[in-house]
Image (spheres, rainbow, N blue to C red):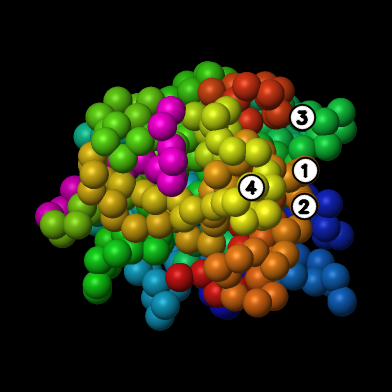
């Protein structure tokens, strides 16, 4: 469809519902990635992904073969509270493919994404922002929207990152929550920043899985995210010793790209379309920020709170940080 992002919300007219029942995430992804939803002026088309293969509560979606890698994202949504995801560079049927991401040796069942803290039809608010190559999904897993007003702080993502490697064809990633257990405090690690030198092979040191390393040798790898001035392991935009916003030096915002590294001191690229504020949660949830120094004139950034290390409630003073999402320009 486009590399300019589209925003989808559970509050849109005709938007699919999400809950802790089998197939709920598939219904959401069918709509936002492929089919679209709504009618008339309120209609939103899908992001431009395609359905490669399908079964009962299982899908394999493919991102753009023109602008992207054409990787598949297999989603097993047969469980109630969570789904299991894995990428493939190619697939011959719903259960067979090449370059499994994560590989079975890393994760036997795939990367877990949670839908709800309860196995029931209780509705959960969500936001999706993405393109034909990459998308972010934010879920109000604990059902706190009514009391807190935060439209989902547990974040996930999948698709092609902005790679530093010319001609890269295996920079497809699937985010990881930091645990293989439902309801665990290991949650939200897709947005948990570490220092560039702080890499390991533990689940709690993993933000996402990448199709292959920069070497091109077959086999998916672990990766982690970082940002400028990250000196402690905490959610992006949550470091307590960051300077106050607005910064006295420029009267405005300090920010950086969100780097994704495949080992210590070895950056692979950036998460597309987002920035990390070098302030602690500088804006109220879903504030639109304009006229940021260093970005094209007219750029608008959407402030989105994200939480790691705390399953419920959605917002946590200690564990909730913030990212800034470019909702104006094409994502690289």
Check whether the beta carbons of the residues at disc 2 and disc 1 lie within 8 A of each other. Answer: yes
Select label 2 or label 4 by which is in front. Answer: 4
Q: Which mark is first along the chain, 4 or 1? A: 4
Q: Which residue is mark 2?
A: 287
Q: Could you give the CA–CA distance between mark 3 and mark 4, rounded to whole angstroms?
A: 35 Å
**Label 4 SS:** loop
Q: Could you give the CA–CA distance between mark 2 and mark 4, rounded to whole angstroms?
A: 18 Å
What crowding class fits label 1: few (fewer than 14 Cα within 10 Å), some (14-19), or many (20 or more)? few
State the residue at coordinates (54%, 23%).
Answer: 309
Q: Is residue 205 left or right of residue 154?
A: left
Check whether the beta carbons of the residues at disc 1 and disc 4 lie within 8 A of each other. Answer: no
Select label 1 or label 4 by which is in front. Answer: 4
Residue 322: x percent and y percent?
A: 62, 42
Q: Nearer the viewer, residue 52 or 99?
A: 99
Q: Which residue is mark 4?
A: 247
Q: Is residue 245 left or right of residue 17?
A: left
Relative to 54, say whether 112 is above or below: above
Q: Which mark is first along the chain, 2 or 3? A: 3
Which span of residues is magenta-colored?
Answer: 217-232
Can residue 147 be seen here? The reply is yes
Residue 225: x percent and y percent?
A: 40, 43
Q: Which residue is mark 1?
A: 284
**Label 1 SS:** loop
């Amino acid at each position: 469809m486009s590399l300019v992002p589209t925003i989808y919300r559970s509050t849109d007219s005709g938007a699919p519902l999400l809950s802790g029942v089998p197939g709920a995430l598939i219904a959401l992804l069918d709509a936002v990635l492929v089919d679209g939803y709504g009618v008339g002026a309120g209609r939103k088309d899908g992001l431009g992904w395609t359905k490669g293969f399908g079964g009962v509560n299982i899908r394999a979606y493919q991102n753009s073969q023109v602008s992207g890698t054409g990787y598949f994202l297999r989603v097993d949504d047969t469980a109630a509270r969570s789904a299991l995801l894995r990428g493939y560079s190619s697939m011959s049927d719903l259960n067979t493919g090449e370059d499994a991401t994560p590989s079975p040796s890393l994760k036997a069942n795939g990367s877990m994404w949670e839908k709800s803290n309860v196995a029931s039809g209780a509705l959960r608010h969500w936001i999706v922002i993405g393109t034909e190559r990459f998308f972010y999904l934010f879920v109000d897993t604990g059902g706190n929207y009514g009391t807190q007003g935060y439209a989902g702080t547990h974040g996930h993502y999948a698709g092609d990152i902005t790679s530093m490697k010319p001609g890269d064809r295996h920079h497809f990633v699937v985010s990881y929550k930091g645990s293989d257990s439902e309801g665990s405090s290991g949650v939200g690690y897709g947005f948990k920043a570490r220092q560039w030198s702080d890499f390991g092979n533990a689940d709690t040191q993993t933000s996402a899985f990448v199709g292959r390393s920069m070497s091109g040798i077959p086999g998916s790898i672990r990766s982690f995210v970082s940002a400028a001035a990250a000196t402690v392991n905490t959610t992006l935009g949550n470091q307590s010793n960051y300077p106050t916003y607005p910064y006295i030096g420029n009267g405005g915002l300090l920010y950086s790209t969100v780097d994704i590294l495949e080992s210590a001191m070895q950056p692979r690229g950036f998460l597309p379309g987002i920035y990390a504020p070098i302030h602690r949660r500088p804006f109220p949830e879903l504030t639109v920020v304009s006229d940021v120094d260093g970005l094209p004139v007219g750029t608008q950034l959407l402030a989105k709170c994200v939480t790691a290390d705390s399953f419920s409630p959605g917002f946590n003073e200690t564990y909730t940080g913030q990212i800034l999402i470019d909702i104006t320009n094409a994502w690289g």
